[in-house]
Image (spheres, helix red, strand yellow):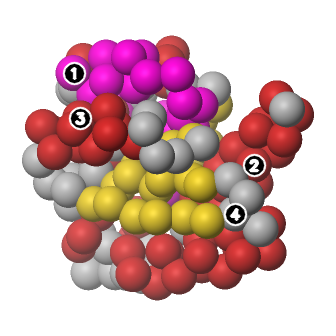
Amino acid sequence: MYKIYVVHGPNLNMLGVRETDVYGCLSLEEINGKITILAQELECKVSFFQSNHEGEMIDTIHDAANHYDGIIINPAAYTHTSVAIRDAIASITLPVVEVHLSNTHARESFRHHSYCAAVCIGRIEGFGAHSYLLALRGLCDFLQDKK
C-alpha cells in the first residue's frame, strides 16, 4: 500500500470562497474527500497538509521523505516565486507531482513559469479538482512501474 502525501500551498484553505470562477466551488475539505475516496479505490493511503507559510511547506517536504512513497503538491503562488520550495523538492528522493486547479498558462504571464516543474516527475493542471485525482492515479502508476 503506497503512502502519498498531498501538500496544499497558500490560500488553498480559501477554496470554495475565493475566486470560484477560477478555482471552482469545492472547498479544500471536499477536494480532500474526493482524493480519499479515490485512494481507497487505488488501495493507497493519503495524508493531507495545508499551509500558507513557505517554511512550513519546506519542513513538511523534508519530513515526508521519511514517511511517504510520493508527494502530490500544489505549491499555489509559491510555484512562481519559491526557489526554496523547488530546492526542497530536489533535496528528497521521493517522486513528486505538481498540481494546479487552473490552467496557469491561460492566466497572467507571471503564472506561466514554475520553479517546481523541473524537479517533479510530472505536472497536471487545468482540470479543477480532477487535477488532484489525475495526479494520484499517475503517481500510483509511476510507483507501481518503478517496482
**Magenta stretch: includes residue 101:** yes
Gap between marks 4 and 2, in whole Å?
8 Å
- Residue tagged 3: 58
Q: Nearer the viewer, mark 4 or mark 3?
A: 4
Residue 118 image label:
none
Q: Which x, y percent locates residue 78?
A: 25, 36
- Residue tagged 2: 140
Give the residue at x 44% y 35%: 65
Residue 84 image label:
1
Identity, as a three-letter code, of the amino acid under mark 4:
Cys
Q: Nearer the viewer, mark 4 or mark 1?
A: 4
Identity, as a three-letter code, of the amino acid under mark 1:
Ala
- Asked whether residue 80 is in view, the answer is no
Q: Which residues are magenta?
A: 84-111
Residue 44 image label:
4
Gap between marks 1 and 3, in whole Å?
7 Å
